[in-house]
Image: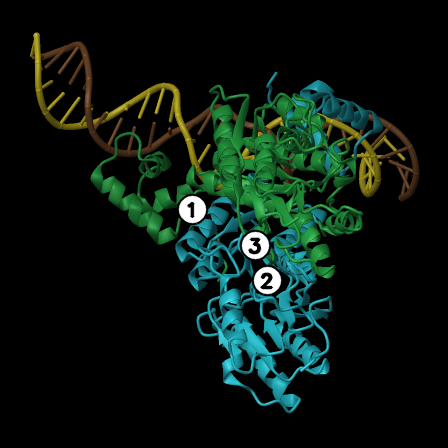
Chain colours: A green, B cyan, C brown, D yellow
DNA sequence: AGGGCATGTGTCATCGTTGACACATCAAAT
DNA sequence: ATTTGATGTGTCAACGATGACACATGCCCT
């Protein structure tokens, strides 16, 4: 039979004490006699009492809920990893997480932020933020914001060192003897820039590629650098771009012996195109991805730059708690990405 | 400067009216003069007023939040799809979604349900429920529960017709001339059974496989049926089982010409093993998956049985709303899964 | 004996929104 | 001139938990 959850008052009545006493027992603070504690515990058990966090939040002005604004959880498993990491850290600390996907629509993002404000979440994490004005709304409402991956405003930001990660990938390929290494990535101009550093995630990865090959005395071939919007909410991250770029690359008179794709979804498209063309990986062509999302599922297992999603989520959450509790939190936390070597890379044969 | 969000009272004061008038303007109900409306709207804009849904929820006993209990969002993209579908439907109807992953721990599931009760969510959707007692807790608290995929209790359930979906996969393979078709799936005994029908998802898929080949006059070969726990939270859904099963299958004196894996993650492992063994798909072996999650990313594009995740989430949400609003909702909604043919299946050559 | 302190418990205003209720005013109808 | 109804607005008690405050004891110390 559908009933209602008991209130503090009902528990108090059943235990024969006041609500204050019940509250003290439950909070474990103040002085309580053993008999009172027992009566209260019995009443709590009998009524299956669950505190009403809505009422508590109204009174204490703390919801113990944080908002997590994501680009689109269905588009890239990277977001799933971050969401899960945030959830783990949050639950451990007694917080709840509310997820909202803006789907690359600034309007939707704004509505999500309004919803977060209406709920009086204690803080909002963005991964990744689209519009600085949404963060400004939170600022006005007195709700701290934390950015993950991209720093659009001067809110604290937790990000990954994409340059070092991408450089490790290039160094790995060069170390295997590759001299013709293609770069398949998103458009650094289209992909939103970091407001503070004036660089996008793609800028960093492309710079690392350029510096990497140059450092090993390899001359950059413009025909091996393929840029484009590599995933979007509409395409659902199909890797189509990766396929097209690879077909073009392999049709060159001097095709690359290795391909560095800046996202596992793109790399999956690369592998598909190579498979369709009958090329073996890594025997004919080596492939490296970025993110470590699909990597274990692909054939062959993809060598990729692993993003520390777990740490990303955890650090972002901890920064949020620091901001909530008024302590000073670092403006920027930079984590490192590391190369995971699997079966898609091997010695250059040409 | 971090300030606080304005309250109704502050808006009312600024507009020179009572809170009731502001409320009426915002709700658009009752009689309001044009002048009052204008003053209120101006005050709302000036203060960036956002209603406090916490306070509203306390008063109205409705949170407009629904809980979504998932197995583990990181383990299978299927859950991501369901979560997204639920979110879309919920937001459209003015609801928020709170996600919680139990990670196949009944204890964690119980804590999640307690958290949902504490928050006074309006309903909880399970995908998939682990322990009937968690649902019983909700029942006691007067919160409706809806189950997705698995029917553990007599709560309304929205599920997919796995039998028909799997049967389509088998019929497709037989139609291509395959006579030696392997079945790679989870353990029907270990994988939790539906309380009402006494069958697990795997039971249905296996039955469809058996009926399917028998219907075409093919004798079942026990050595082609490989069962085991194919993913778990710990393994992170690595597809390892799929690889191992495939290696064993291809080592048979009479290896199959087609493999039907009951999950895309498993199928990815199958493709990896075939790739490592130098077999071409579909030239040497055809492969069919289930779920349509990783399918587009794999090489070659995987023919798979697509789960109607979007409809699953939408229908579950609508059932929840029906339950919240007291209307009678159907006890069971069965949706159909359909085969999506890509590049991993082709004519049998043996 | 009386002050001081530890221990134990109850009362009540408060958080922000809602909606029932009361009370206006004014035009039209009797 | 009064009634009726439409229109417009304000007051206030909920919702449930919290914690400041007040008020009890009983014990120890001077």
Q: Are marks 1 and 2 in contact (CB under 8 Å)?
A: no
Mark 1, residue position? A50
Residue A266 visible to the viewer: yes
Residue that lies at the very extreme toward the front in this rendered image: A350
Of residues B231 and B173, the one nearer the viewer is: B173
Residue B268: mark: 2
Give the structural element (helix, strand or loop) at label 1: loop
Residue assigned mark 3: A301
Q: x%, y% of residue B21?
A: 72, 30
Residue B91 in the image: state x and y as whole percent: 68, 46
The mark closer to the camera, 3 or 2, is 3
Q: How far, Cα to Cα, is label 1 from label 3?
A: 47 Å
Chain of the residue that carries numbered disc 2 in the rendered image: B
Crowd class of label 2 (few under 14; some 14 to 19; many from 20; radius 10 Å): many
The residue shown at (49%, 19%) is A328
Q: Residue B76 carries which label?
A: none
The answer to which image quadrant residue A291 occupies is top right
> Which callout, 1 or 3, points to the residue nearer the camera?
3
The subunit letter for the residue under badge 3 reads A
């Amino acid at each position: 039979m559908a009933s209602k959850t008991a209130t503090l008052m009902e528990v108090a009545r059943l235990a024969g004490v006041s609500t204050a006493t019940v509250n003290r027992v439950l909070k474990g603070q103040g002085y309580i006699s053993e008999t009172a504690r027992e009566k209260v515990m019995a009443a709590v058990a009998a009524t299956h009492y669950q505190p009403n966090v809505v009422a508590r939040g109204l009174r204490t002005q703390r919801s113990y809920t944080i908002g997590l604004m994501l680009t689109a959880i269905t588009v890239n498993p990277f977001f799933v990893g971050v969401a899960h990491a945030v959830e783990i850290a949050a639950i451990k600390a007694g917080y709840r997480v509310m997820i909202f996907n803006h789907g690359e629509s600034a309007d939707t993002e704004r509505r999500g932020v309004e919803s977060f404000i209406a709920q009086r979440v204690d803080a909002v994490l963005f991964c990744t933020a689209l519009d600085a004005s949404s963060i400004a709304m939170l600022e006005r409402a007195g709700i701290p914001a934390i950015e993950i991956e991209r720093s659009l405003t001067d809110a604290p930001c937790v990000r990954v060192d994409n340059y070092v990660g991408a450089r490790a990938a290039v160094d790995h390929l060069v170390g295997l003897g590759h001299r013709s290494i293609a770069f398949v990535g998103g458009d650094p101009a289209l992909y939103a820039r970091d407001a503070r550093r004036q660089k996008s995630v793609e800028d960093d990865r492309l710079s690392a590629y350029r510096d990497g090959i140059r450092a090993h005395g390899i001359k950059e071939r413009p025909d091996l650098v393929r840029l484009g919007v590599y995933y979007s909410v509409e395409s659902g991250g199909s890797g189509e771009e990766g396929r097209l770029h690879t077909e073009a690359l392999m049709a060159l008179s001097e095709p690359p012996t290795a391909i560095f794709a800046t996202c596992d979804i793109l790399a999956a498209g690369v592998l598909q195109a190579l498979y369709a063309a009958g090329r073996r990986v890594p025997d004919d062509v080596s492939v490296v991805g970025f993110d470590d999302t699909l990597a274990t599922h692909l054939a062959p297992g993809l060598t990729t730059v692993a993003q520390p999603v777990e740490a990303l989520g955890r650090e972002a959450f901890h920064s949020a708690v620091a901001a909530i509790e008024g302590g000073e939190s670092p403006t920027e936390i930079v984590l490192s990405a590391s190369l995971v070597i699997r079966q898609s890379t091997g010695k250059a044969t040409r």
